[in-house]
Amino acid sequence: MKRLSQQKDDSLIEVMIALSLTAITALGIVAMQTALARGEHEALVRERAT
């Protein structure tokens, strides 16, 4: 059986891992939206140039 303090430590680590994964996912989504916006802007510039 695990001691109570070890269970608390384990749950804290699980929360930290979950928050890290959430942050990484959010950064990936922001990066994708930025890349899409940049591509859309470049397409608009090309369309206006012709």
Image: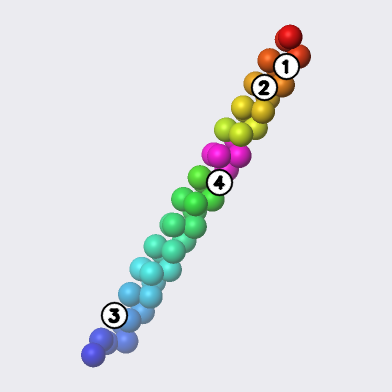
Task: Identify the residue position indicated by label 2 in the image.
Answer: 43
Q: Which residue is mark 1?
A: 47
Q: Is 30 included in the stretch rendered in magenta?
A: yes
Q: Amino acid at mark 3?
A: Gln
- Is 23 on the left-hand or right-hand side of 49? left
Question: Amino acid type of disc 1?
Answer: Glu
Q: Earlier in the sequence, mark 2 or mark 3?
A: 3
Discs 4/3, front: 4
Are dots 2 and 3 in contact, CB under 8 Å? Answer: no
Name the chief secondary structure element in magenta. Answer: helix
Q: Nearer the viewer, residue 18 or 46?
A: 46
* Residue designated by label 4: 29
- Which residue appears at 54% of the width and 39% of the height? 31
Q: Which residue is mark 3?
A: 6
Q: Which mark is residue 7?
A: none
Residue at horizontal 44%, vertical 64%?
18
Location of residue 20 with respect to 44 vertically, above or below: below
